[in-house]
Image: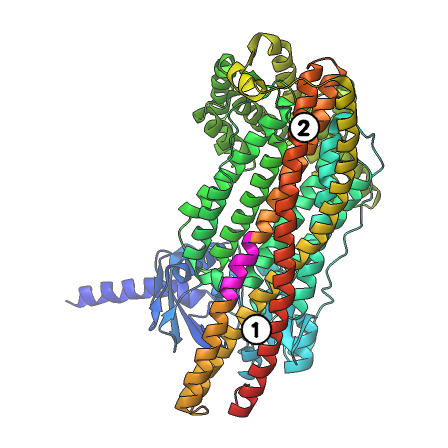
Amino acid sequence: MYLSYKIGFFVFCILLLPCVFSNIINEDNMKLFAVTPEGIGTDANLAISIKPGTGQVWSSIKSLVGTSTQNTEKTAVELLQKYAKNTTEYDYFFSINSTAKVVDGPSAGLPTLLLLIYMIEGKDLPDYVSGTGTISSSGQIGKVGGVIEKTKYAAQTGIKIFFIPASELEAVIKEDNEVKKVNLASYAYEKYGIKVIGIENIDDVLKYNLNDINTVKIPNQKKEEKPIYDPPATTFRDNLKDFYNYISKYNEEVNTNILLVETVLKDTDLEDSDLLTELYSLLQDAKEAYNDGKSAYSKNYLYSSANQFFKANVSVNLIKDLIENSEILTANTKINELVKNLQKDYNLPFNNISCNNYEWQISAQERYLWATKRINNILSTPGNDKTTNILKLRDYEEAKEWLKIAKLFSGYAIQDYCYLNQKPYKESADQVLDEIKKADAIIAKYDLTDQDKWIQGAKDAKDMNWYFATVFEGATALASINSYLELKDLNLPQIKQMVEEQLKELEPYTKKDYVWTNLYLQHANYYYNEGLFYEEKSQEQNALESYKSAYQLGLFAKNLSQVTEDIKKNKQSISYIDTKSKEKNIKNIGDWNLYQGLAFVFVLVILILIFVLIIFYNKVKANKGDQYLMYINFRISKIKQFLIQAEKDYKNKKLSDQNYVELTENLLKELQFLNEEGVKISKKTEEIKEFENQIDIRHKKVKELKENYSKNLISQDEYFTKLREYDIEVSDIQKKIDEDVKEVTKTALEQKSTVSKKKGNEKSKQKKRGLK
């Protein structure tokens, strides 16, 4: 019996040894901060116990614990191994006490790991220290929501030092009815007396002596300005003239959108500081991308500018979505509805590839596939939280932009009833997919994701029997993979040398009349010159990324040049004439003499000039429709706010039954009226744009007709008959535009005046009733 007591006592002592002979603190706690669904700061208490064990993690939360909180605790314990030995000889018990029903979210990652490190090192963490931020498996601190609200509440509860993600130091707040951008470190210290410090990783925190608050200084954490790259000019190519004209229009469209959104943001009624910060961040991204695109466009780097304008327009349209209907962030069905409407509007016929300008039609198919991938992502992604829905909205805007560009590219092909038979390229399509399959192990080994768009595009194209697009997408994907493999172990000077050798090797390709070869080579030169620029500014990392991009684009150009050359070589043997369509379009050709034809051409030229002026004038008017639509959406938002306020005032007995019923009835009537107006104006504006597109198409057809006639590809009779047909079509379409523009402009002016009067009367009535 005595022996068994001795053995038991011995085992007990052995179990205590890690705690006795190490300096760890076995129990400690700290405050955590969160934001309620109503947007108000709140706190919770995190308690940690460290006991001898085997590295297990236990969560005991009086409120219901969420999965993301448990995962955060496990990540923190795993990272602890970097700062102490023998961490697997302990078990870790986490307890969070909160008034909230559910405690969930990864924002406690930063404070949890900080407390663990102090405990395992046997140091007391002062109770005036806390923070918020997600933490990755590498120790990087990531963005969280409600930083401003958490900071304010932390200061109120006695916290003096508060760590946040460095990426959230710049915040947007609404104060005294003014939306403004602030540096949270300066703002919080002046306003609340709390030291806010932005950090990139947990090591940044450990540099401070937190036990001596006087030594903790707020660092100057202003974002380093990126130098502005202005590329040297490159040669303009005639075969890219249509694309150049499109970029010119794209430039105007993006610039107008940015100015509109910037104006609207200044007067927004949004109160959500997180959302405002996100919107201003998107606007800044859009401006930077637009300026880069404008610079590239002015120097004839067409694909470079198109890429930047694309990014800018996606960001700006995303801002529009969120301003016009912020409820969409918590309404997954609304996003799905947008997607379904998009699919309905852009069900475009891309199956036939024209003998002429076939590169544009193949690239139209590619962009259609990219848009489809985005749409599938939206419909298959679970979740209905803000972060997920913003990502879905971005996918939606990218899909919308890709489809718009696909429609444009498909219109560049000359419709002469001559098409390319894709079936002979089925074998090539199979071969390129086999090559991609062989690369699966490499993709998995190096976790390559940039190629997903092209790999999936190649597979989807094959399923649709678009064999040219399969080969184009596959060639691009393989070029991207090879680029990574060739450069992954090289330093900056070596990569730079490879780029220079590659550009020299590809110089003869610039003399070939291949669309995408030339666009990609221009783009490669853009990045090569950008690399030189960053090297000169001693920004080696930026230079390295630019050179890598240049090399990858060079491989794109090389691979696509080989594919295009092969199609061109076989063009005669794989082309065919769609005789049925051709006969259908020319069977009613009449007999015109030369003098009648010349007279008609003269009249048509005059008409075209007049139409160009009319279209320009109409577009200015149509913009009024767009502005009125924006005004309607803002008015709807205001009325919804009035309804919410009326409900609150009624519950608080600030409104009588009669006043409440009368007020809500009037507001609901106006809401219905504005919704109907919005639908009507939206339809008319879209109709005008579609009619204008139809006229543009007719003008292109006239140009093609003249070229074919000058080359003796069509007869004189066919030439003048088609000219007459186009003249009649243009006149009919123009009449429809005139009617729609007149209706939109009249409605916008009359109804805006009516709504303004109602708004004034409504404010007067609300003031009398005490509704603010």
Q: Magenta part of the protein: which range?
A: 674-683
Compared across the picture, whether 214 is left or right of 419 comes to right
Q: Nearer the viewer, mark 1 or mark 2?
A: 2
Q: What is the quadrant of residue 540 in the picture?
A: top right
The residue closer to the viewer here, 441 or 120, is 441
Q: What is the quadrant of residue 66 in the picture?
A: bottom left
Q: Which mark is residue 177?
A: none
Q: Position of residue 350 (x, y in %)?
A: 53, 29
Q: Main secondary structure of the magenta part?
A: helix
Q: Earlier in the sequence, mark 1 or mark 2?
A: 1
- Residue under label 1: 271
User: In the displayed structure, would residue 125 be above or below residue 458?
Assistant: below
The residue closer to the viewer here, 390 or 622, is 622
Amino acid at the residue labelled 2: Arg
Q: CA distance from mark 1 to mark 2?
A: 58 Å
- Residue under label 2: 724
Query: How many residues crowd around disc 1 within 10 Å: few (fewer than 14), some, or many (20 or more)?
Result: some
Describe the element under mark 2 as helix, strand or loop.
helix
Circles 1, 2 touching at the beta carbon (< 8 Å): no
